[in-house]
Amino acid sequence: MMRFTTLARFVVVAGMAAVLAACSSTGGGLSPGLTERMDSGTAQLNTGDAIGIINSYRSTVGVTPLIEDPALSAQAATIAANYARTGRQAAKPEGTSEIRYSAGYSTFAETFSGWRNSNQQSLVMSGSSVTRAGIAVVYEENSPYGVYWVVIVA
């Protein structure tokens, strides 16, 4: 199987983002759930669109899409809330393959770019042995980073 370089992956994902933007029902651009700033108490992440972006990336490396798992998303929400409150990253939950954290990025688009551009993080998102994912974001106004992200894959 042909391995894409990091630059080639970036170009492919950027192209997919442009296609998604052109197809958006919001009149252009990515879904507001992906580009909306999460640094407010009322912001809502569109988890389906977020996992869709991860799946677009996974398609560039020839692995099957992840299925959004509500139970994993609930775990991610609990872990993200604790992360925001304490600043400490918990160990991956039993029965899962990987957990990834991020803090300080205001939008999912920024968070995904950070994960995608890190070799270790991108390997987790493109792993062929995982089939399910859960994602959550928490805003904690009085914390060092404000916005805390967690993705769990199994």
Image (spheres, grey):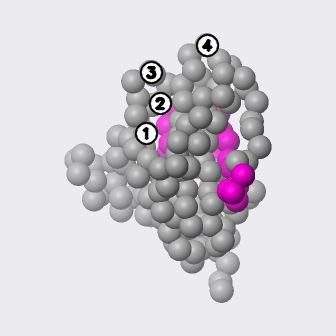
In the picture, the disc for residue 41 is 3
- Circles 3, 1 touching at the beta carbon (< 8 Å): no
The verdict on residue 99 being magenta is yes
> Mark 2 or mark 1, which is nearer the start of the sequence?
2
Q: Which residues are magenta?
A: 94-114
Residue at figure coordinates x 49%, y 37% from the top left: 107
Kind of residue at disc 2 = Met
First-in-chain label (4 vs 2): 2
Q: Earlier in the sequence, mark 3 or mark 4?
A: 3
Instruction: Kindly check if marks 1 and 2 are in contact, taking CB atoms under 8 A apart as contact.
Output: yes
Give the CA separation, mark 4 to mark 1.
20 Å
- Examine the rendered structure and indicate whether residue 100 appears above or below residue 16: above
Q: Is residue 29 above or below residue 64?
A: above
User: What residue lies at 57% left-to-right and 75% top-to-bottom?
Assistant: 63
Q: Which residue type carries mark 3?
A: Gly
Number of disc labels: 4
The Cα atoms of the two marked residues, 3 and 2, are separated by 8 Å
Is residue 57 visible in the rendered image? The answer is no
The answer to if 87 sits in the magenta stretch is no
Quarter of the image that includes the N terminus: bottom right
| Marks 3/4: CA–CA distance | 12 Å
Disc 2 secondary structure class: loop
* Disc 1 residue type (three-letter): Leu
State the residue position of label 1: 45
| CA distance separating discs 4 and 2 | 14 Å
Residues under labels 1 and 2: Cα distance? 7 Å
Q: Which residue is mark 2?
A: 38
Residue 11 image-quadrant placement: bottom right
Residue depicted at 65% across the width and 83% down the height = 2
**Residue 81 pos. (x, y %):** 60, 29
The answer to whether residue 142 is above or below residue 135 is above
What percent of the width, then of the height, locates residue 25? 23, 51
